[in-house]
Image (cartoon, rainbow, N blue to C red):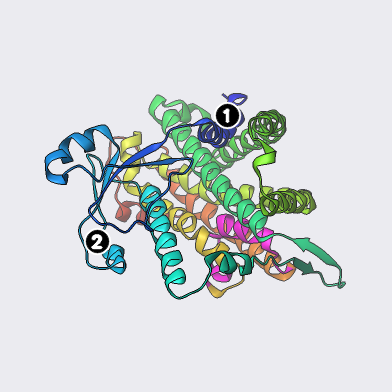
Amino acid sequence: MTLLTPLFMIGVFVIPILLASSSEDKTTIAIIDNNKFNEFRLTSSHNLEYTYLNELNLEQHKTTLIETYDFLLHIPEIDSIQQIESNVEVYSINQMSLSIKQNVENQIDKKLTNIYLLQSGINPDQIKKSESKSTIKTYVVDEQGENTKGNSEASFGIGLVGGFLIYIFIFMYGTMVMRSVIEEKTNRIVEIIISSVKPFELMLGKIISVALVGLSQFAMWIILGFVFLLIANGFISADIDVTNLNANEAVLSSEISTSLMALPIKSLLFVFLIYFIGGYLLYGSLFAAIGSASDQETDSQQFIVPITIPLIVSFVLVQVVIDNPHGGLAYWLSMIPFTSPIIMIARIPFGVPLHELILSISLLIGGFLLTTWVAAKIYRVGILMYGKKISYKELWKWLKYTD
């Protein structure tokens, strides 16, 4: 499974691209236009095929047409061409997708705009030639005044993927710790083990051992990921005809590629590992405490929800943080130990001052020590507690027990 996981993760991204690029499906749309506006006529594109059937009666042929075509577009009889804007109707067996709806609306708007321009004596081709598409170059200036070329799109992608990976890893390895504790408790193997070691040492050893397994898997995934990515890149490059790219797309692709190569990959990986380990240790100790308080996995659900809420909130807010990585929300969420592992990773590609990074890591270490202390108090009692439904009130009593 360790070997197949990076292949699976890359496949999740690559296979849809290959399927989308090789798909030749066309959406067919029948049009019944009850007007005589010859200047308004939609034209087929590479993925939309329009067929005009103006001679047919809508009510008589509606059922047959929506069974034959994907959609039936009807323009009822109107007095002026301006009324088309609010009188186009679409009939179909299934709901029209948002992308197709926007595609059709955009084409209608373009046709009407051109007609309005011509009616005003303006040539639409001149307007099109006058359109400008500007691109700005971004540079990040460090404390020594050195400029480094940046790319907002590349930073967005790195931040989003990094936050997603931290979210997945914490959940995956945290639940692994919890299940391991429950299994040892159910088999009563733990009663033999704690005759030799203290409960705190047992809990910490379990968390650290799973962390080492996770790091080993992570290192292997990085190596295999690069190998699979190179192979997948070869397939995609061969599948996509670069001659179909226009000049702007080619320049954008080149800039993103250059920016990705210019990113401080080693620094990003180092910070990623710190937050991965810190976040895992923080949540892993809490998952271990939950496992010790549960006789079986179903009993743990009531305790998992409050713990996972900060993780879920962080994941949901990642895109908001990426849109404004230096705002107040991003700053405070990257300082709170329960949300900083995901939020700070999302901010890092956009540049974070060193003092903020040090403060965030210090708070994360402090949070880990606090949660480990709390988890150890619950663990030492819960690991030997059987056959009792544990409540939050009971957990509070365990926290106040003294040696």
Callout in the foreground (2, 1): 2
Q: Label for residue 5?
A: 1
Earlier in the chain: of badge 2 and badge 1, it is 1
- Residue furthest toward the left? 60
Query: Is 295 in front, or is 322?
Result: 322
Query: Is 100 in front, or is 280?
Result: 100
352 in the magenta segment: yes
Q: Secondary structure at mark 1?
A: helix
Placement of the N terminus among the 4 image quadrants: top right
Q: CA distance from mark 2 to mark 1?
A: 52 Å
Asked if residue 401 can be seen in this view, the reply is no
Question: What's the magenta region?
Answer: 329-353
Q: Label for residue 394?
A: none
Is 364 placed above or below 91 here? below
- Graded by Cα atoms within 10 Å as few (under 14), some (14 to 19) or many (20 or more), the crowding at tag 1 reads some
- The residue drawn where x is 60% and y is 57% is 346
- The residue drawn where x is 68% and y is 34% is 237
- The residue drawn where x is 53% and y is 69% is 123
Residue 140: x percent and y percent? 77, 67
Asked if residue 71 can be seen in this view, the reply is yes
Amino acid carrying mark 1 in the image: Thr
**Residue 120 falls in image quadrant:** bottom left
Q: Secondary structure at mark 2?
A: loop
Residue 174: x percent and y percent? 50, 41
Query: Which residue is tagged 2?
Result: 87
